[in-house]
Amino acid sequence: MAKANGVVSDARIGLADLCAIVFHERLDKSTPLRVRTDWDNAQLSTEQLHYAALDASASLQLYHHLSQVSIPVMITESTLPGTPVSVLQNDGQVIAHGILSQEPPAPTCKGVNHTPSRAQVTIQHVVVPGALLPLYDTSLAALGPTPFDVLVKRTRLQHRGQNQPNADTAQVVPPPAFAEAGQQTHDQLLQFLSRPVSADEDWTEGVDDPVGEAEETCDISSAEPDRLGLEEGLILLHEMASSPSLWPAAIRSRVLMDVWHAMACIRVSKEHGFRRPFARALRDAMLIPDAADKSRISHYLASIGSSWDDVLRIKPRWLWKHCKRTIPPPEELYALVKEVYTTFGPLLDAKTRQPLFNARAWKDAGNVLKAIQAGLLSDPPGIPLYFQIGVDKKHGNLPIYRCARGTNNAEGGVHHSGRCHLPISGVSARHASARLRDFVLMHNLVVSKGPVCLGTVLILHNLGWHLEPHWNSI
């Protein structure tokens, strides 16, 4: 986030260095507490709690500050004099702030010729006094006290706008205060969302598979509802504050709950006849296609005799590769998801005559709606979650996107295999580390050059055979 907003040039910068750059304050990370081996103890010392609290508080304050920093844009010849600018080094680090000079342009400035690719800048604040200006081959400090004018390549200038906050005037936003009862509810909600969902329980699988013949003939308008269950469910849902003005406005985190994991926390029978139509309806309520991308794709599909709805039924993954999707703000998402719950929840299965939602599922649905109210599922504003990685030349030069939301390839590949090696809960960090090291060893043996059967690998090792392991495989 700091790199995207032009505050730093390297996204790998540490928390202490970022605090120094943004707030001009020192966050002590040299203490021996950082490398202690007892951080997995149930009871932490006062010093450890203080150390962890400082890290959490500093991160929150940095987030609030960076959220106010507008994304920088490059300077062009049409940019007006007096525009606030930042001067960058070749590595992207900001070395000074100022404005485009309001003085009439002269042929030279301090002995350097004025050209169309250069702009005259009035330096008002020097960030790195020892930084060298390439056109002058001297440091900023050597050019005298501010303000002073220099020529800078336009490619080394960025504009942020008049409302750019700086580290000297930025207000530190305190963390939200919770009442004791509210904090207890919040903790219970996080505990609910953190509940592991096994593969046998995950009813959301197959949501992007082609629609089968059975689903084509599945008509919810003629389905029989469990009216008593619906009434009980509505009573439960109506107990929550439905007015957005009463909901918490704080953005909890930039790293939010995996939305499909949250939905899978509702315990629904995988054998229910309306399970897959429910999952698809929930998908379309939560993840809204980008209007521009959808229009572009629809025009292309129309040119080849197809349509958005046709492809959505038979090949939805192709659509999501070419179309960004957003999770709406809480006040919009709440209404969309609640409507899906009340529509599908009471529907009876034709064979078992059981509703899709039993009493426990209605309670789980209420907890998910509470998570939506708390802002734990909506996309954080101003944070790009899609990145274009190419162009599909075979299909009308449509953009190809990669999404940062949900489970990445590394987690989805090794994580699912390694998950069965860990206890569901109550494991210490030391225990988890030992289990993962054992999993890494077994994984490397299995993917070694030669036989791929673990039993065969161990037998060949016992017989003295040498198998070169792929140590970089995990």
Image (cartoon, grey):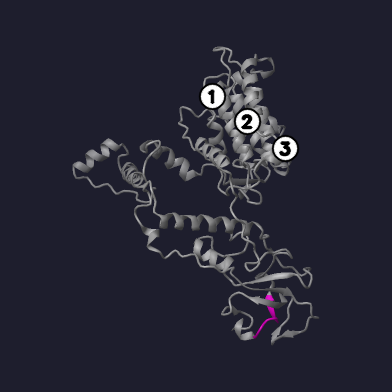
Would residue 21 be found to the left or right of residue 444 on screen? right
Q: Position of residue 111 (x, y in %)?
A: 69, 87
Q: Residues within 10 Å of mark 3 (few under 14, many from 20)?
A: some
Q: Amino acid at mark 3?
A: Ser
Specify start and end residues of the magenta stretch as a single range.
144-152
- Residue 129 lies in what quarter of the image? bottom right
Q: Residues within 10 Å of mark 2 (few under 14, many from 20)?
A: many
What is the number of callouts on the image?
3
The residue sitting at the bottom extreme is 111
Task: Tell whether position 26 is magenta.
Answer: no
Q: Amino acid at mark 2?
A: Leu
- Residue 158 lies in what quarter of the image? bottom right
The residue sitting at the left extreme is 463
Residue marked by disc 2: 282
Residue marked by disc 3: 298
Give the label, 3 or 2, closer to the camera. Answer: 2
Residue marked by disc 1: 360
Q: Is 351 located above or below residue 397 in the figure?
A: above
SS label for mark 2 = helix
Please report whichever mark, 1 or 3, sits nearer to the chain's N-terminal start: 3
Q: Position of residue 411 (x, y in %)?
A: 46, 43
Q: Amino acid at mark 1?
A: Arg
**Is residue 139 visible to us here?**
no
